Amino acid sequence: MAPITLSAETTSQVFPFSILIEGDGRIAFVGPALAKVAGIETLIGKSIFDAVTIRKPMRLDRTQALRDVLGARVVLEVPDRNGSGTLKLYGMACSAEWHGRGHVLIVLTPGVNARQFVECHGLKISDFGPADGSADLLPLLAMQEDMLQDGKRQAAKLRAARDVAEHLANHDVLTELPNRRALMERLSSLLRQSPLAVMHVDLDKFKEINDTFGHAAGDAALQHAARAIRLAVGPQALCARMGGDEFVVVLEGEQTPVQLSACAQRIIAEVSRPFVFQAESLIVQASVGLAIPRPGDALSADDILHHADLALYEVKRTGRSTTALCTPDLLAAHSEFQRISADIRRALTEREFVAHFQPQVDARTGGLLGFEALARWQHPERGTLTPVHFLHVTHRAGLIQQVDAEIRRHVLDTLRHWDAAGFRVPKISLNVTTSDLLDPVFRQVLLWDLDSRGLDSSRVVLEIVESVLYDESPTEIAKACQDLADAGFVLALDDFGTGYASILSLVKLPIAIVKIDRAFACGVARSKSQHALTQSMVGMATSLGLTVLAEGVDHADDVAALLDMGCGSFQGYYFAHPMDAETALAWVIEREYPQESLRRRP
């Protein structure tokens, strides 16, 4: 290949990234663009082998000078004048005449690195040679860079959205505390690592605030409780909202019952501090169940939370705004509860719940007023059980309405059977719970049960315990009582004197019968104070036009004393024990009450 003849001007314009090398290997000329990025002082006059790094051809022999690179592809790395490393260029070597002498010309281009040269050293398109394809790449590279940056921005947005979604998935929006999902994951991990203790916090009076001041006030109460709990336990504890008005606190490390109880008391104290909502000073309180896993228990996260929940239930059962610790005795009691509740469910399917009947009589005439239906469980192994063996479990397990419905079915079937046999019992008394009164369909179901058996509602006395009058829903209770009275049912107030009913309650509610509790009736003839109290209750009820019935009467002298007070209706062992349906009917026949009071009138 014949050498090309070059001038400095031509070389600068056509080959701005070129290097001109003399025969002895020294650099005689550097193109202006290359001089900008590498610095002319670092190249001119120096040996090509010292000034740059030749990557291709590899293993170039200095003794061969540059003859071996003529016509070959060359890759060089030149020093960056900014001192930040080297710059890679690509090109080709050829023979050239410069001022009448032979030289080697290495024509270079940044290639795909053109954007780096532009951004880092301020080169412009005019700095590239007319035949340098690198310049043509610049718009494409710029577009590529824009796309890359846009991709990065989109990726950043996606990461941010993912982080937000992850935060929302693991945190309660209202309180910013970890939610149940996050708690379970963290608690499961902690149980495998170190000792810990768990506190289950439930807010007291929260429903009252929600119902009185609205849901916004309820939200404010939850936020207040979350802040109070975090303040009480410190930043190292794990606090989470389980949902509703329930929170869980996990403390890492060994905790004694005394230490844990002290921490729970701090929570109760902080939560109980008043908080302000719309210029109103409100107070919410807390109950706390405690659980400390014992070494070797091998409990899961669900297990330890269940233990804390059992302790919390114990607090709710015995009193609020305090603490209780889950103990082996409490676990054993719960196991017994589970066993009995499962047995009750089985008994409901087998129809083992029946009614026994205790007569209510008029001691002045000897006439039968009716029967009170009392629940009994005909257990296949334990015999006939009274409510003391199962009533507390039915309430706690939420089965009381099912058991009551089964008892009612048996009572009404028995009443229909007696009617069909020609014996018309005047009235039958059924116990009614708060759950029944708050059930919107209870009245309709009861009326349907009567209609389907051809029975009249006026023959049914519904006994309401005195404590029902002070339930958390007094307005609903009062309306339900009035609706039942309007439907023809007779309402009786049971256990009168043992609760908190007031004279005003007796006036406002459609009560027709007051039942003096056995605590006052039994032994009234032998106690002056008991006699005085009972006489005042009988006098108050009769002055209001109510029928008074004394229950739990076991002795003749008590009957006589109550008769003298003006109470003529009785129920108790003195007259008869509770009996099954067949025995009760036999008792009626044997007593030979006046037939006109028993036989069905045509």
Image: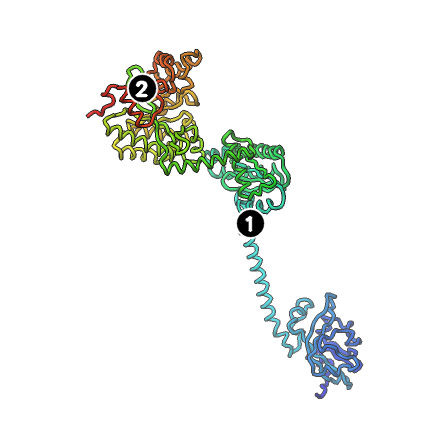
Q: Which residue is mark 1?
A: 167
Residue at 57% in and 59% down:
155
Q: Which residue is mark 2?
A: 361
Asked whether residue 510 is in view, the answer is no
Q: Residues within 10 Å of mark 2 (few under 14, many from 20)?
A: many
Q: Which of 105/60 is in front? A: 60
Q: Which of 492/504 is in front? A: 492
Q: Position of residue 38 (x, y in %)?
A: 73, 71
Q: Position of residue 123 (x, y in %)?
A: 67, 70
Residue at 77% in and 77% down:
27
Disc 2/disc 1 C-alpha distance (Å): 69 Å
The answer to which image quadrant residue 272 occupies is top right
**Amino acid type of the residue tagged 2 in the rendering:** Val
* The residue positioned farthest toward the left in the image shown: 602
Q: Quadrant of the C terminus?
A: top left
Element under label 2? Answer: strand
